[in-house]
């Protein structure tokens, strides 16, 4: 096995152990492999080991990488900030956009989604721990934005996504993730048909799964450490 295949196997074991501990079904948690800064060969290795969903932060980099991997049926997720001048690329090249936090961006994505493609799957990014300089809609505005996004014809609203600050230990991680889960349940209670709560990364995927995450986004544990920016 390659290192990446080995790593993927270990991450899958972490996910299944966490699901067992939380009495959840392993099929209810999707693993998204985050390949930012790693080249197409790394993605190819993970694909060969059975991984199908990949997350990318840098839109231009992702589009170039995806072009080199066009022979593979990969599901690409945009998990980085989306500026207005990048919506056309996101609409054309991704299956999912997880970082929608403004109506204007959602409207552009809907207008620009090419006719030949299925609706763009979307999550609303929520600034769950209130970091002042962070992207994401404040939790108290999530319901209103979700209702508007759900009306857009070429988008399919799937759920919420969060990137909390690193927390010290499992209990602190789980407490923040539990707030996101409560918000997710509140929106569902308000009648929105959501099925995706994207939260948890290499350092906190167990806590996220314990709190009710349905999608963990894992980079370092699969591909190794990224060069620091
Ligand atoms: C980089 C990144 C990840 C993966 O982080 P790791 O700690 O390497 O697992 C997940 N989500 C987002 C939004 C990221 O930017």
Image (tube, rainbow, N blue to C red):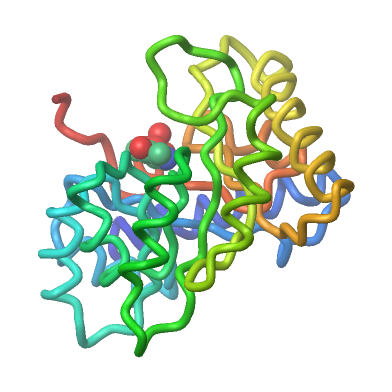
Q: Quadrant of the C terminus?
A: top left
* Left or right of 189 on screen, residue 145: left
Q: Would you say residue 102 is visible in this rendering? A: yes
Q: Would you say residue 1 is visible in this rendering? A: no
The residue under the point 47% across, 50% down is 98
Query: Total of numbered circles in the picture?
Result: 0
Q: Quadrant of the N terminus?
A: bottom left
- Residue 30 higher or lower than 174, as above or below: below
The residue under the point 58% across, 24% down is 138
Q: Looking at the rendering, which quadrant does residue 22 occupy?
A: top right
The foreground one among 35 and 160 is: 160
How far across and down, in percent of the image, does residue 205 sit? 59, 38
Q: Looking at the rendering, which quadrant does residue 133 occupy?
A: top left
How far across and down, in percent of the image, does residue 182 sit? 81, 33
The residue under the point 35% across, 72% down is 113
The foreground one among 32 and 137 is: 137
The residue under the point 53% across, 24% down is 164
* Left or right of 87 on screen, residue 212: right
* Left or right of 146 on screen, residue 119: left
The image quadrant in which ligand 1 is located: top left
- Residue 131 higher or lower than 150, as above or below: above
How far across and down, in percent of the image, does residue 4 sit? 32, 58
């Amino acid at each position: 096995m390659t290192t990446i295949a080995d790593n993927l196997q270990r991450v899958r074991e972490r996910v299944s152990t966490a699901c067992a501990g939380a009495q959840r079904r392993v099929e209810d948690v999707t693993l998204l492999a985050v390949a930012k800064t790693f080249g197409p060969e790394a993605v190819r290795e993970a694909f060969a080991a059975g991984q199908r969903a990949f997350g990318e932060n840098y839109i231009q980099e992702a589009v170039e990488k995806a072009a080199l991997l066009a022979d593979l049926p990969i599901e690409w997720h945009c998990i980085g900030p989306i500026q207005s001048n990048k919506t056309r690329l996101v609409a054309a090249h991704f299956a999912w956009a997880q970082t929608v936090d403004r109506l204007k961006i959602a409207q552009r994505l809907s207008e620009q989604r090419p006719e030949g493609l299925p609706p763009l799957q979307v999550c609303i990014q929520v600034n769950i721990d209130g970091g002042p300089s962070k992207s994401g809609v404040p939790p108290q505005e999530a319901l209103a934005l979700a209702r508007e996004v759900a009306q857009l014809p070429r988008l399919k609203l799937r759920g919420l996504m969060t990137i909390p600050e690193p927390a010290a230990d499992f209990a602190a991680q789980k407490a923040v993730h539990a707030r996101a889960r409560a918000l997710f349940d509140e929106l569902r209670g308000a009648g929105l048909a959501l099925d995706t709560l994207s939260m948890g990364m290499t350092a906190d995927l167990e806590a996220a799964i314990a709190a009710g995450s349905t999608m963990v986004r894992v980079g370092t544990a699969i591909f190794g450490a990224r060069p620091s920016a």
